[in-house]
Image: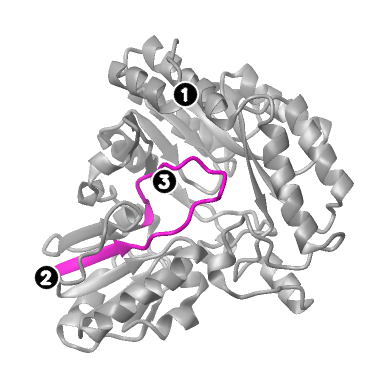
Amino acid sequence: MKFKLIYPKWAKLARQTEFHLPPHGPVVFAAALPDSVDIDFVDENLEEIDFDEPVDFVGISMMLTVQVKRGWQIADIYRKKGIKVIFGGIATMLHAEETMQHADSVFLGEAESRMEAVLEDFRKNRLKPCYNYIDDRPDIGLVGPARRDILNRSLYNYKGVQMVDLVHASRGCRFNCYPCAVSYLGGREFRPRPIDRAIEEMAGIDNNRLFIVDNSLAQNTQWELDLFREMIPLKKKWCSHPIEDKPEVLDLAARAGAWYVYQAVFDTSDYIRERIKRYHDHGIGVEGTILLGLDKHTEDSIKKLIDFLLEIELDLAEFTVLTPFPHTRAFAELDGQGRILTYDWDKYSADRVVYQPKHMSPKKLQELLDYAWNSFYADEPQKMKMVKLFQQVVRKEMEDNTYQPRDRRMAGQAFGRTIRP
């Protein structure tokens, strides 16, 4: 069977650097397919889809809400040709009812141990409109190494600089944050993979730089300590979402190769100031993820927050506006209050205001988003800050002899200056 797996294109944030990471969802899904399936993967962000190429079955993997309308368009083209289409992925789960109108089938939930039955239904022409396993999650121990072999590796670099590979060591999240859908997608129970299996996968990735995409590593102290301890011999360099704010955890994370973290900065408290300092004290960089437009935000408080970000010396910052994605507390609240202004999913890009803020007009919040980007990067452009963060990983790699000199030359070309460790 020839199975064409497609990752629809999507528009990046207006201020983001134009590089693309290898997508995680498709390669994890591909690992759940039997070896007998011939997988042809297309990342439409980097390659064109050949709609005339012979194929038996099409799968469309959607991670982001801004991918869904393009995913539907792709499915409509194939279905007009008489080719059956199945959807899966995070955004499919968030937009299941609408997606079913463009699909022969939708798969909701985690795919491990499930796909043999789905493919048997396809072969017997009895494909179900929906396979719903959202509340019936497979044993986390079944999660094997992702099928990175389906990727065209040459596409995932930025002007010659090797991008990170994505990997996960757990699923689920015990937190239930206001703008986040993870409690719906993966459940409120923290489900760590067996550490030996996660380590085996990391060791097998032919890339020294990883992005551990777990929702948060700060879920279980003993698990973090055990994971980081086992990661030390790998000599990988990695970024992640938050690490627990405990000295012993941060120390082991640094020894395990922590490069930088994505850390939400939600207020101007001394705790946040010290939290960032503790990361830096352990040699771990910080990219602040800054969400604007919460109900507590006023124009004045947002401007004070930006001033605070400059004081605490973040390595990078990424600014977004609150976006009420389906199946989040934010959506339930704002939709219930009649404050959502549009359900055009192409506008749910996290850099466009799609709801009525509490203390200002949508136009003013949009202006403040621009103000945040412009103010934070006024004295030092984003690319220069990226250079400094890249220098950190170069130094770490040189210290343990895992550095590839080719990146040094190409990074200088990419960012407009020479990298000097």
Q: In terms of depth relative to the viewer, which is nearer, 134 or 159? A: 159
Where is residue 289, by image quadrant? top right
**How far separated are the C-alphas under marks 1 and 3?**
22 Å
Q: Secondary structure at mark 3?
A: loop
Q: Which residue is mark 2?
A: 1
Q: Which residue is mark 3?
A: 168
Q: Is residue 389 above or below residue 86?
A: above
| Image colouring | one colour
Cβ–Cβ under 8 Å for marks 1 and 3: no
Q: Nearer the viewer, residue 386 or 399?
A: 386
Asked which quadrant contains residue 237, the reply is top left
Q: Amino acid at mark 2?
A: Met
Q: Position of residue 142 (x, y in %)?
A: 31, 56
- Amino acid type for the residue under numbered disc 1: Phe
**Label 2 neighbour load within 10 Å: few <14, some 14-19, many 20+:** few
Residue at image location 33% in from the left, 18% down from the top: 409
In the picture shown, does residue 3 fall above or below 251?
below
Mark 1, secondary structure of its residue = helix
Q: Earlier in the sequence, mark 2 or mark 1?
A: 2
Give the main secondary structure, helix, strand or loop, of the magenta stretch.
loop
Q: Secondary structure at mark 2?
A: loop
Tag 1 residue: 390
Instruction: Tell me which segment is drawn in magenta.
Output: 1-25
Depth check, mark 2 against mark 1: the one in front is 1
Mark 2 and mark 3: Cα distance apart in space: 29 Å
Q: Amino acid at mark 3?
A: His
